[in-house]
Image (tube, rainbow, N blue to C red):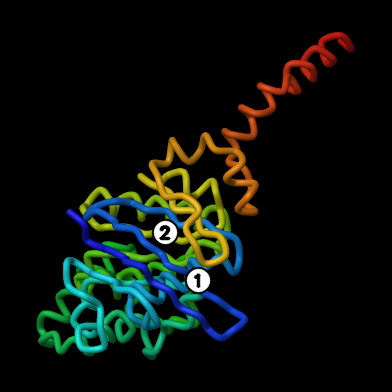
């Protein structure tokens, strides 16, 4: 069942900067999708379009079979949550508790229900002991967890992570990706926007964007076999593909043989 459908969507910032060009795709409920692309490829423009922050100049976007329009955007934002690269841009409250509550307040969630969700989801992301802390005093990973808690508290079915790991240290990055896996297993539709190929290979399917268009969108194992696609899209080759190419070109075998001769 398609939870997202994008039909012939185009968006331009100005005459010289085209964000999206006739983009078409669909995503099934419960999928984990990675959107790969170099800087300026259109992936963040696409993310903002999916949550209604940018309105397509052409084409249509459907969330759970409902067309995204100015009239439906408010209700559809309940279904789609986004965590940006810099979570500081999302914080508006004085405390962590205030920030988790913010989205629910906009949705007019009853106070008793709101307090229950704050405690539940703060604990779910490991941030319950920080509820009275100021967001500015948190680490990058903790801020991302608070942003996720706020989205989950709004009962969003679709979670978009827009370069959410790019500012994190390796340990915190792995921790956040592990949590994405858990959320996906629990039934959430996860869209991970990244330029890190080694993160993208964890997804069910990979979309590669280049200059506002989709170069490819297929199962991960199929995408990983296409060396020329990565080169053409100005992306680093996945480690597995690099090794396969090295073996194919006999470079590793020759290096090992040279090492043996020197022993």
Q: Could you tell me residue 53's position as x and y percent? A: 38, 83
Q: Name the residue located 89 percent from the left edge and 12 percent from the top edge.
A: 262
Instruction: Give the answer, above or below, for where 240 lies relative to 42.
Output: above
* Residue where numbered disc 1 is placed: 85
SS state under label 2: strand
Image quarter of the C terminus: top right
* Lower position in the chain sequence, tag 1 or tag 2: 1
Q: Left of 199 or right of it: where is 15?
A: right
Q: Left of 25 or right of it: where is 196?
A: right
| Rendered image quadrant of residue 18 | bottom right
Q: Could you tell me residue 224's position as x and y percent? A: 51, 38
Q: Could you tell me residue 192's position as x and y percent? A: 42, 59
Q: Nearer the viewer, mark 1 or mark 2?
A: 2
Q: What label does residue 33 carry, if any?
A: none
Callouts 1 and 2 close, C-beta under 8 Å: no
* Residue where numbered disc 2 is placed: 192
């Amino acid at each position: 069942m398609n939870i997202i459908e994008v039909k012939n969507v185009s968006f331009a910032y100005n005459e010289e900067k085209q964000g999206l060009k006739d983009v078409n795709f669909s995503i099934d409920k419960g999928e984990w999708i990675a959107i790969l692309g170099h800087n300026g490829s259109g992936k963040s423009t696409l993310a903002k379009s999916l949550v209604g922050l940018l309105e397509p100049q052409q084409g249509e976007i459907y969330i759970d079979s409902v067309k995204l329009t100015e009239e439906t955007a408010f209700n559809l934002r309940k279904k789609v949550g986004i965590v940006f690269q810099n979570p500081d841009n999302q914080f508006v409250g004085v405390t962590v508790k205030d920030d988790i509550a913010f989205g629910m307040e906009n949705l007019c969630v009853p106070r008793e229900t709101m307090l229950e969700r704050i405690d539940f989801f703060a604990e779910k992301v490991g941030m319950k002991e920080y509820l009275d802390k100021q967001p500015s005093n948190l680490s990058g990973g903790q801020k991302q967890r608070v942003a996720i808690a706020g989205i989950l508290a709004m009962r969003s079915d679709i979670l978009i992570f827009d370069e959410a790991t790019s500012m994190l240290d390796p340990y915190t990055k792995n921790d956040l990706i592990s949590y994405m896996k858990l959320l996906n297993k629990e039934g959430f539709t996860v869209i991970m926007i990244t330029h890190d190929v080694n993160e993208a290979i964890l997804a069910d399917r990979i979309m590669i964007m280049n200059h506002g268009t989709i170069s490819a969108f297929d199962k991960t194992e199929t995408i990983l076999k296409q060396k020329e696609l990565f080169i053409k899209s100005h992306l680093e080759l996945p480690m597995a593909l690099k090794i396969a190419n090295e073996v194919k070109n006999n470079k590793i075998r020759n290096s090992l043989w040279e090492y043996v001769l020197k022993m």
